[in-house]
Image (spheres, rainbow, N blue to C red):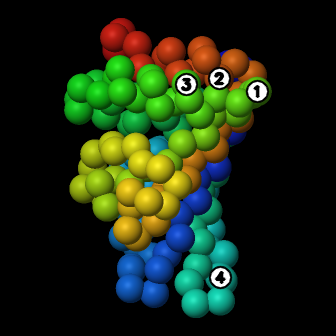
Amino acid sequence: MDEISVRVEAEVNPTESEEKVKRAIENIFLNMKMQTKPLAKRSVLIAEAESKAAFTRLHSMLRRDRIRAAARKVLLEGVSGKTVSFCLNKQVAYAGHVSFSKEEAESPLGPIKVRIHCSNPRELVKWLTSENV
């Protein structure tokens, strides 16, 4: 898991505060470089990092919320080659918790889309969801 990069995207709807969407991402991931990309009637917040340290908070939250087994299943389903993709509920992330969601259906304000590229995605999933702290 030497090389790792993560890209997080979340739409900022006209009814949402960009600061709150940033906060939702920061509640889950650490040390992200963020930028806003304007679109027609909304914008997209893009956050990126190239360090395993970005996942430290997520790692802790999976234990605190006792959802390691469920997280392992979702994360493994999202493995494709050297990539892990999954979505998080934006409102739940803002509240400081983790809830996995489908692309659009389960998150009325749109999901936080996460795409991780690393040399060994299964090893990353194992680290994120293992019992060891």
Q: Could you tell me which quadrant the C terminus lies in? A: top left
Q: Earlier in the sequence, mark 3 or mark 1?
A: 3
Q: Type of residue at label 3?
A: Leu
Residue under pointer 2: 121
Do tag 4 and tag 2 residues touch (Cβ < 8 Å)? no
Q: Type of residue at label 4?
A: Pro
Callout 1: 10 Å neighbours few (<14), some, many (20+)?
few
Residue under pointer 4: 38
Residue under pointer 3: 76
Residue under pointer 1: 81
**C-alpha distance separating marks 4 and 2:** 31 Å
Q: Earlier in the sequence, mark 4 or mark 3?
A: 4
Q: Earlier in the sequence, mark 2 or mark 3?
A: 3
Relative to the observer, which residue lies in front, 76 or 23? 76
Do tag 1 and tag 2 residues touch (Cβ < 8 Å)? yes
**C-alpha distance separating marks 2 and 3:** 9 Å
- Which residue is outermost to the front? 105
**C-alpha distance separating marks 3 and 1:** 11 Å
**C-alpha distance separating marks 4 and 1:** 31 Å
